[in-house]
Image: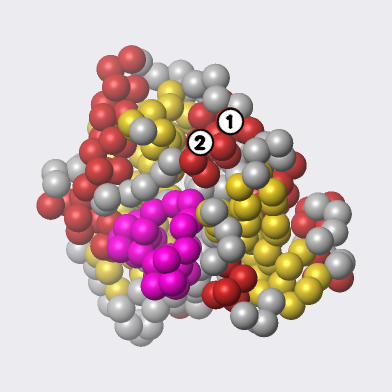
Amino acid sequence: MKKIAIIFGGNSYEHNISCISAKNIIENIDKTKYELSIIGITNNNEWYIFNDSVKLLENNTWTKGNIIKITNIIEYLKQFYKVFPIIHGNPEENGKLQGFFDIFNINYVGSNTQSSILGYDKELTKIICKENNIPQLPYIVIKENKTIKEINIDYPVIVKPAKCGSSIGINIAKNIIELNKYIKLAFKYDNKVIIEKYIKSRELECAILKDKRLIVSPIGEIKSINKFYDYEAKYEKESNLLIPAPIEEKLTKEIQQLSIKIFNILELKDLSRIDFLYDHNNNMLYFNEVNTMPGFTNISMYPLLIKELNINYTSLITKLIEE
């Protein structure tokens, strides 16, 4: 059997989400095909072999279970056919971990170093997409954590860290006082902040799976319980996921075509979720962001969208490993 390692955790605000994603993959991986090892990274970036009940991942108490510290990480990882780093957020989703794998010729699931960097940094993604005529909302980038007096975008605006996931540190500002307050908050999560025009819109998402060719999912819609799909709405309250989204076929095709284009221009690999905002009042579609390592929790949109293609959880994991 092929030896596979699932890697989870990391020094990230999304550590808990990574644990839950890992639990789902561990429970659904085809154990008749793969000999599985589980590796956890603590908040202090120490690597451990985890050999205990996956229930400990559910409430993030895995470090209290049966763990063995890995002293030579490189040599340990080289034994595997492929590693699956189901890690969300800084510093492991932003290209650093992928660069580590690339240097030591360790095969892994997901996009390479360059594409992970481009996909994780929302400003870089926007720059590339703008050059390729992908429709986006007006935005500016702030690189210094200091009070500003005015902006050239009409309120309300969305304020968000340029490099952060799970809608962490995101707020809507309706005036200059709120704007400066939320800029300071966003700088707690990153050294670069994006200010973007806020519109009342529908949040639509598309999943892509690379399996010899690009497989494009139906479109899903998020009906957020909050004003927008922030961390609380994702993981602490019950927002509704509509799959497939109740939209016209023409819009479905447009989103799918743009998703393929974005996947290709960013040179992504294996999997991605592409997010859009649809201004239904003015019939305008805007690219929002890309996720190079989507969540695999029970409520994560990516595996649910792929399931609509009659690819179950186990088959999805197998395709990602074998691609």
Q: CA distance from mark 2 to mark 1?
A: 6 Å
Q: Residues within 10 Å of mark 2 (few under 14, many from 20)?
A: some
Q: Is residue 296 left or right of residue 282?
A: right
Tag 2 near tag 1, CB within 8 Å: yes
Residue drawn at x 77%, y 57% as measured from the top left: 57
Residue 315 disc label: 1
Name the residue furthest top.
249
User: Which residue occupies the foreground of this view, 5 or 258?
Assistant: 5
Looking at the rendering, the stretch of residues picked out in magenta corresponds to: 93-120
Classify 309 as above or below 18. Answer: above
Q: Quadrant of the C terminus?
A: top left
In terms of image quadrants, where is residue 114?
bottom left
For the image, the number of numbered tags is: 2
Is residue 11 visible from the viewing direction of this image?
no
Which residue in the structure is indicated by mark 2?
Answer: 319
Q: Is residue 55 left or right of residue 303?
A: right
For label 2, the SS is helix
In terms of image quadrants, where is residue 212?
top left
User: Which residue occupies the foreground of this view, 228 or 92?
Assistant: 92
Amino acid tagged 2: Lys
